[in-house]
Amino acid sequence: MDGRRERDTTTAVSHCACPFSGALALGRGIRYSLVAGFGSLYGDQIEAFFSRYYKLALLILIGLASVGGILTLLRYLHLRRNRERDAEAV
C-alpha cells in the first residue's frame, strides 16, 4: 500500500460525521414528509385503484420483475463470456 492511499484513508476517517449525519437526517425527513403528504392526499384514490385492479397490477409487477431478471442474467452471462475471452487473449 503506498503512502498516498493510506493518507487518503486516514483523512476520510478523521472528518467529522456531523454534517453528513445532518444532511442524511434532513433528506430523510423531507422524503418521508412528502410521502406522508401524498399518502394523505391521494391515499383513498390509490387504495380504490389497487382494490379494483389488484390482479392486473400484480401480474404486471411479476412480468416486469421476470423481464428484469432475465435481462440481468443475459447481461451477466455476456460480460462473463467477454471477460473469459479477454483473459484467454492475454
Image: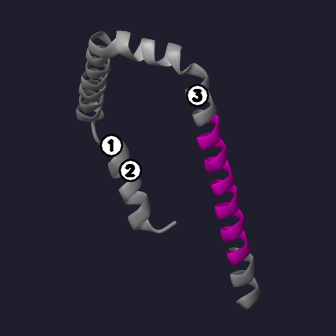
Instruction: Give yes or no for residue 72 being in the magenta stretch.
Output: yes
- Nearest to N terminus: mark 1 or mark 3: 1
What x and y, as percent, mark residue 21? 29, 29
Q: Which residues are magenta?
A: 62-82
Q: Which corner quadrant of the image does residue 59 belong to?
A: top right
**Place of residue 80 in the rendered image (x, y in percent of width and height, measured from the top left):** 71, 69
**CA–CA distance between discs 2 and 3?**
53 Å
Front-most of residues 80 and 1: 80
**Which of the 4 quarters of the picture holds residue 47?**
top left
Mark 2: few/some/many CA within 10 Å (<14, 14-19, 20+): few
Colour option used: one colour
Closer to viewer: mark 1 or mark 3: 3
Q: Is residue 48 above or below residue 12?
A: above
Q: Nearer the viewer, mark 2 or mark 3?
A: 3
Q: Which residue is mark 1?
A: 14
What amino acid is found at the position of numbered circle 1 in the picture? Ser
Q: Residue at x 26, y 13 (%)?
A: 41
What residue would you read off at disc 3? 56
Against 22, residue 2 (above or below) is below
Does the magenta segment cover residue 51? no
Residue 69: x and y in percent read 66, 48
Helix, strand, or loop for circle 1?
helix
**Residue toward you, 20 or 3:** 20
- Residue flagged by tag 2: what amino acid is it? Thr
| On-image quarter of the C terminus | bottom right
Tag 2–tag 1 contact (CB < 8 Å): yes
Which residue in the protein does label 2 denote? 10
Between 48 and 37, which is closer to the camera in this rendering?
Answer: 48
Q: Position of residue 37 (x, y in %)?
A: 26, 15
Q: Quadrant of residue 27?
A: top left
* Disc 3 residue type (three-letter): Leu
